[in-house]
Amino acid sequence: MWLLLAFIAVPLIEIALFIQVGGAIGLWPTLAIVILTALLGTWLLRMQGAAALADLRRSFSEVEDPSEPLAHGAMILFAGALLLTPGFFTDAVGFALLTPPVRRRLFVELRKRVRVARFESGSQPRPDPQPDIIDADYEDLDVPKTSSGKPSGWTRH
C-alpha cells in the first residue's frame, strides 16, 4: 500500500515542483538545474560508493558485522537512482541519502525494526554436527584381471 502511494505521490510532487520552479526562473534554468544535479549527484555517488565499498571490505577483513556498511551501500545505491531520476524532490531525497549523518540515522531506525539472528564468517570453524563420520580416500586393491576375465598369472591367489 505504501509503495503504491509513493508511485502516485512522487510524480505528482515532481510535476508540481517543475511547474513552480519553471514558472519562477524559466524553462532553461530549470533544465540546467536538473542536468547539473544529475552530474553532481553522479560525482558524489562515485565518491561515497567507493568509501562504502572500502568500509565493507574492511568489515569483511576484520571479521566484523557487515550489516552497517551493506546498509550504507544500499542507501547510496538508492540515492544514485533518485539523483538520476529527473526532478527536484527526488534530487533532494537523493542528496540527503548521500550525507553520512542521514544514513546513520536511517540505519539506527532500521536497526530498531530488524533483528539479525546470527552472523558467521566463513573462516571460523563450525562444530561438526556428525562426529562419527570420517572423511577419507580409498584405493581399490583388487587383483587386475585380463580381458578374458582370468588373473594375468603374474601373481598367485
Image (spheres, grey):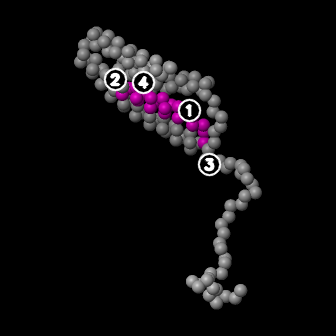
CA separation, marks 2 and 3?
Answer: 45 Å
Q: Is residue 152 left or right of residue 16?
A: right
Q: Can residue 108 be seen here?
A: no
Q: Which residue is mark 2?
A: 86
Decide: few, some or many residues near mark 4? Use Cα within 10 Å; few <14, some 14-19, many ≥20: many
Magenta stretch: give its range: 63-84
Point out the tag, 2 or 1, that comes first from the N-terminus.
1
Q: Is residue 103 left or right of residue 145?
A: left
Residue 78 drawn in magenta: yes
Point out the tag, 3 or 4, that comes first from the N-terminus.
4
CA separation, marks 2 and 1?
Answer: 29 Å
Point out the tag, 1 or 4, that comes first from the N-terminus.
1
Q: Which residue is mark 4?
A: 94
Foreground pick, 111 / 52 = 111
Label 3 sits on what residue type? Ser
CA separation, marks 2 and 4?
Answer: 11 Å
Label annotation for residue 123: 3
Label 2 sits on what residue type? Pro
